[in-house]
């Protein structure tokens, strides 16, 4: 009888322990001064990185494994860069730069980075008079874009949840003998500070470089936020 009671207790213990072992944690703006960067940048450029959200608390143990959840924003520290990345300190911002990319041009309101051995470009513009609505700003500039690039093909303009206002404008164009996929993020981080981050990658390499774009915007730091 003692042996039978001990076995029963052990089995009850397994019912509690197994669920515990199986449980786990769930995981800007327009302004259009310069047509090159896009809506938010020129008059009131792209938005800055979104605030980080802490991971949700682990669910209470149950007899079945919980359904995993996905956090809205990455929990990784944006100040810690992947191996090979560097940080560029600009006059109104700092931004992570992928391996092999370097500054090729600077101006009073623009910095251009280029990809070594590729057609990739990243242009950062800023201004002090951002538009209140980044989506409306990009939409107002979109019809004229075909005059500035070759074989322009509109893809989308979508609002993003970043700083005061933010929108991503995407299109295709032809340059340097390649088809280029462009994402132009316009956003405002303050009433008197707007940015645009224009990310250009060969269309054939677009998906492979989306994680790099995410790292860029996650680590972007503006000089003004309100």
Image (cartoon, rainbow, N blue to C red):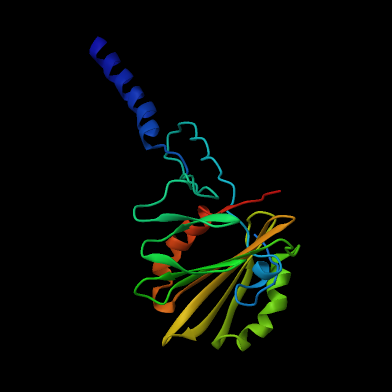
Determine whether 77 is above or below 214 in the image. Answer: above
Query: Residue 132, image x and y in percent?
Result: 76, 62
Looking at the image, which residue sits at the far left?
Answer: 3
Task: Specify the quadrant of the image occupied by residue 210.
Answer: bottom left
Instruction: Tell me if residue 115 can be seen.
Output: yes
Query: Residue 184, image x and y in percent?
Result: 58, 70
Query: Residue 122, image x and y in percent?
Result: 50, 69
Q: How many marks?
A: 0
Task: Specify the quadrant of the image occupied by residue 42.
Answer: bottom right
Residue 116 relative to residue 77: left or right: left
Q: Nearer the viewer, residue 22 or 52?
A: 52
Query: Residue 205, image x and y in percent?
Result: 39, 73
Report the residue at 43% width, 61% height from top: 212
Residue 17 relative to residue 46: left or right: left
Residue 57 relative to residue 128: left or right: left
Report the residue at 30% width, 21% height from top: 10
Q: Nearer the viewer, residue 197 or 159?
A: 197
Q: Nearer the viewer, residue 128 or 52?
A: 128
Q: In which quadrant will I find the N terminus?
A: top left
Report the residue at 66% width, 54% height from top: 163
Determine whether 79 is above or below 202 in the image. Answer: above
Instruction: Tell me if residue 1 can be seen.
Output: no
Report the residue at 49% width, 44% height from top: 75
């Amino acid at each position: 009888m003692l042996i039978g009671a001990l076995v029963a207790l052990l089995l009850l213990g397994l019912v509690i322990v197994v669920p515990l072992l199986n449980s786990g944690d769930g995981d800007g703006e327009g302004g259009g001064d310069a047509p090159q960067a896009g809506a938010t940048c020129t008059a009131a450029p792209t938005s800055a990185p979104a605030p980080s959200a802490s991971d949700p608390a682990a669910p209470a143990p149950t007899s079945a494994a919980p359904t995993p959840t996905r956090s809205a924003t990455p929990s990784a520290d944006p100040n810690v860069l992947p191996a090979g990345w560097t940080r560029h300190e600009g006059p109104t911002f700092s931004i992570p730069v992928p391996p092999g990319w370097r500054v090729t041009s600077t101006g009073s309101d623009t910095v251009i980075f280029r990809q070594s051995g590729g057609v990739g470009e990243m242009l950062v513009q800023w201004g002090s008079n951002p538009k209140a609505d980044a989506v409306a700003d990009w939409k107002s500039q979109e019809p004229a874009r075909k005059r500035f690039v070759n074989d322009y093909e509109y893809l989308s303009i979508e609002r993003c949840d970043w700083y005061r206002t933010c929108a991503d404008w995407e299109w295709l164009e032809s340059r340097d003998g390649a088809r280029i996929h462009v994402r132009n993020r316009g956003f405002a981080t303050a009433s008197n500070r707007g940015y645009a981050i224009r990310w250009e990658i060969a269309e054939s390499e677009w998906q492979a470089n989306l994680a790099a774009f995410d790292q860029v915007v996650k680590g972007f730091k503006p000089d003004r936020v309100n």
